[in-house]
Amino acid sequence: MSGALLGNLLLFGRTLRRLGMDVNPGSMIDLVTALQYIPIGNRSDFYFTARSLLVHRREDIPRFDQAFDYFFKHRGKQPPLGRIRRQVVPLPLGEARSAGEGREQQRIDAILTYSEREVLRKKDFAELTPQEIDEVRKLMDAIVWHVRQRKTRRRRPGRGRQADLRRTVRRNLRYGGEILDWARREPKRKPRPLVIIADVSGSMERYTRLLLLFAYGVARALEQKVEAFVFSTRLTRITRELEQKSVDVALREVSRTVQDWAGGTRIGEALRSFNFRWGRRVLGRGAVTMVISDGWDRGEVALLGAEIARLQRSSWRLLWLNPLLGSPEYQPLTRGIQAALPFIDDFLPVHNLDSLEALASHLEHFGEHRPQRRQQKSPRSPAGP
């Protein structure tokens, strides 16, 4: 467990105590021990584990929820530099000079470690060394992934506007049948499916490994099943390969399955293959679709425009993640991007750790309603396969 995460856990316990909850050090030790057996990136598992260990009264649940939401949004983040310095306790005057020098060296090391990580968070994935990739891989594990849930047509007991007549009658039998306490229902929520379609062609080769690590981390962290596909000259489904418990095993299985690494790019044909073979299977129940590509395309532009329009109509929200978008000099001038832009709901960068954290926040704070579409009439796609 990282020092930043442990520090945030201690701050979480202190916040609960300030809110009036009975949280003692023994309960926090139990929580830290439990984190060895549950994935902290899974919001639901971590929430119910922490609540079962730290909440002892029903009336404390709203206060716990408030503190938990704040903690989960800031989990794994490094404290500001000023806080790092204040954590260093000066030695008493009577101690040896050598011990004082050692404490000072620890303070400098802590500051340098923080500074290096901040630089690493902003560094482009294409510029990372093998050692930095290993460090980035660890930092990616600390990102919290949560897609905002959707309302269903089913109802559950809650604080909604709709009255629950059956529960109202049962609840008011104690009053002799006179209606004094109304029971209500609210919409039941379920997680939205997530679909990732990633470009592994030659132009994306510098980003491929990190983006596959990103897809693996998202698939492991979310409650719902994540469908993942990669394409270069043809489309390949890698959902089963990413279900491996070990990330190294998963990447080996993906490399064995995909036959067209670093080849040419035919985005339109890959999207047509997805729409006709997989669209109806994986895009139901308000799915969110993420296409990861730099937009360089050797195929037909008309085909790309028609298929991206079809994909947007089938998805509740369509995101296009472009690693080149992180550059201040980038302009969407390629034919593929120009054909796709009218049918993209969110055009976002995905080139470093900061951009991944911004993406995680964006997925969690979607609006309730489908985005307003800017679609125009697109050319018809050739007959599907």
Image: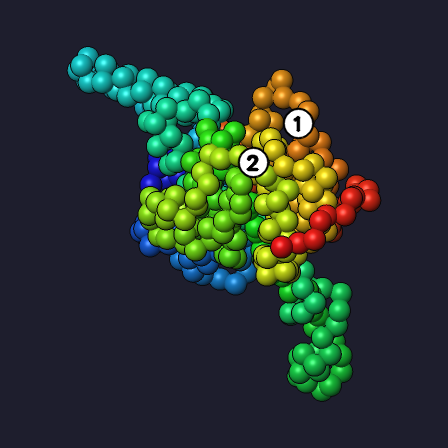
SS at mark 1? loop
Left or right of 166, for residue 376: right
Quarter holding residue 378: top right
Q: In the displayed structure, would residue 356 be above or below residue 250?
A: above
Q: Which residue is mark 2?
A: 265
Q: Position of residue 229 (x, y in %)?
A: 52, 48
Q: Position of residue 88 (x, y in %)?
A: 34, 23
| Among numbered discs 1 and 2, the one appearing first in the sequence | 2
Residue 385: tell me if it is visible.
Answer: yes
SS at mark 2? loop
Give the residue type that dot 1 points to. Thr
Give the residue type that dot 2 points to. Thr
Query: Which residue is pictured at 35% across the width and 45% down the height?
Result: 252
Q: Where, quadrant-wise, is the N terminus in this rendering? A: top left
Do the residues under discs 1 and 2 have CB atoms within 8 angstroms?
no
Q: 79 or 383, which lies in front?
A: 383
Q: Position of residue 366 (x, y in %)?
A: 66, 46
Q: Which residue is mark 1?
A: 334
Disc 2 residue crowd, few under 14, some 14–19, many 20+, Cα 10 Å: many
Q: In the displayed structure, would residue 94 be above or below residue 239?
A: above
Q: Nearer the viewer, mark 1 or mark 2?
A: 2
Residue 43: tell me if it is visible.
Answer: no
Q: 23 or 321, which lies in front?
A: 321
Quarter holding residue 62: bottom right
